[in-house]
Image: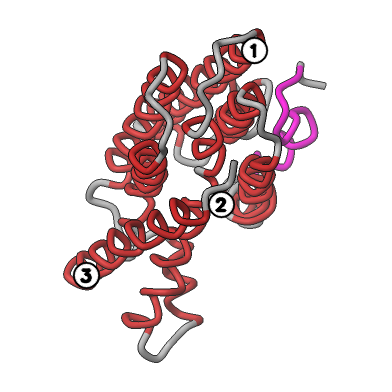
């Protein structure tokens, strides 16, 4: 069920975390640090829902919180490692430029509070799961299989991309091997699978209303901060990308044309 009190308390907790990150961004002069903490904010929201639930912790709850923790820490570590020593991400440089003057103050709600609120919405399936004491059923096994698929795509494709970018010989080339042979964004596809998996866990608990979470994540991945945003500029930076687009699916993995 939807617990308005748990939701409200969780929003407050994440807004406090967002405020602390905003202070850190003022010191570092880089709002891009929010990316490293995005998954951890979702983890914090899930833990809030768990603590505020009146239901006793079950084996299902333990499995889900373990999966959530693994996903969140892996993603946070990867993004931090990838961005370490780099200048502020170009996305945030554009946002900074378009919101002058006083972006330093505007970023509190444009970047940090907004992402904190989105993190709570994405975490809603966890409220459904932790408010139910239902036994493990067939849908849980399907959800686990989908989660494992998503984590495989996320972690392997991120590692392949990191290795590809680490070589100066690949500066103007396009990664079209490994999982990137079958999808132009296999890491985003993995993220897509992970959050539809958490929704399946919620459905296994008897709750459908949290479908807003995977739908929101899908929109973010496809239309907002994921595929569309990256592909709007990548062809200018990598001329070979146009040919890659002709042979490889943008999102859902499939054999090259």
Tell me the crowding category of disc 1: few under 14, some 14 to 19, or many 20 or more residues within 10 angstroms, Cα based: some
Q: Earlier in the sequence, mark 3 or mark 2?
A: 3
Q: Is residue 251 magenta?
A: yes
In the rendered image, the quadrant that contains the N terminus is top right
Residue at image point 47% right, 17% down: 60
Residue 214 lies, in percent from the top left, at 64, 40
Q: Which residue is mark 2?
A: 237
Q: Which is nearer the eye, 142 or 71?
A: 142
77 is higher (above) or lower (below) than 110? above
> Which of label 1 and label 2 is nearer to you?
1
User: In terms of image quadrants, where is residue 16?
Assistant: bottom left
User: In terms of image quadrants, where is residue 200?
Assistant: top right
Q: Which residue is mark 3?
A: 23
Tell me the crowding category of disc 3: few under 14, some 14 to 19, or many 20 or more residues within 10 angstroms, Cα based: some
Q: Which residue is mark 1?
A: 142
Residue 35 lies, in percent from the top left, at 38, 51
Q: Which is nearer the eye, 61 or 211?
A: 61
Tag 3 secondary structure: helix
Q: CA distance from mark 3 to mark 2?
A: 33 Å
Write the start and end of the magenta stretch as one range.
Answer: 239-254
Q: Residue furthest left?
A: 27
Question: Is there any visible trace of residue 162 in the rendered image?
Answer: yes
Residue 176 lies, in percent from the top left, at 61, 25
């Amino acid at each position: 069920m939807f617990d308005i009190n748990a939701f409200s308390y969780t929003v407050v907790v994440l807004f406090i975390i967002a405020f602390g990150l905003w202070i850190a961004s003022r010191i570092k002069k880089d709002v891009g640090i929010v990316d490293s903490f995005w998954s951890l904010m979702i983890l914090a929201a899930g833990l809030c829902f768990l603590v505020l639930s009146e239901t006793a912790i079950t084996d299902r709850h333990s499995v889900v919180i373990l999966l959530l923790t693994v996903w969140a820490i892996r993603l946070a570590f990867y993004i931090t490692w990838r961005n370490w020593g780099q200048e502020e991400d170009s996305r945030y440089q554009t946002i900074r430029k378009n919101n002058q003057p006083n972006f330093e103050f505007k970023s509190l709600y444009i970047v940090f509070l907004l992402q904190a609120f989105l993190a709570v919405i994405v975490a809603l399936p966890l409220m459904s799961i932790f408010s139910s004491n239902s036994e493990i059923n067939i849908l849980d096994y399907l959800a686990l299989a989908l989660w494992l698929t998503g984590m495989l795509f996320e972690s392997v494709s991120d590692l392949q991309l990191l290795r590809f970018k680490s070589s100066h010989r690949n500066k103007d080339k396009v990664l079209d091997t490994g999982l990137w042979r079958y999808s132009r964004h296999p890491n985003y596809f993995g993220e897509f699978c992970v959050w539809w998996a958490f929704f399946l866990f919620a459905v296994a608990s008897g709750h459908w209303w949290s479908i807003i979470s995977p739908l929101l994540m899908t929109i973010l991945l496809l239309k907002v901060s994921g595929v569309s945003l990256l592909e709007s500029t990548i062809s200018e930076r990598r001329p070979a990308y146009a040919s890659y687009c002709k042979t490889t699916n943008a999102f859902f993995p499939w054999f090259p044309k």
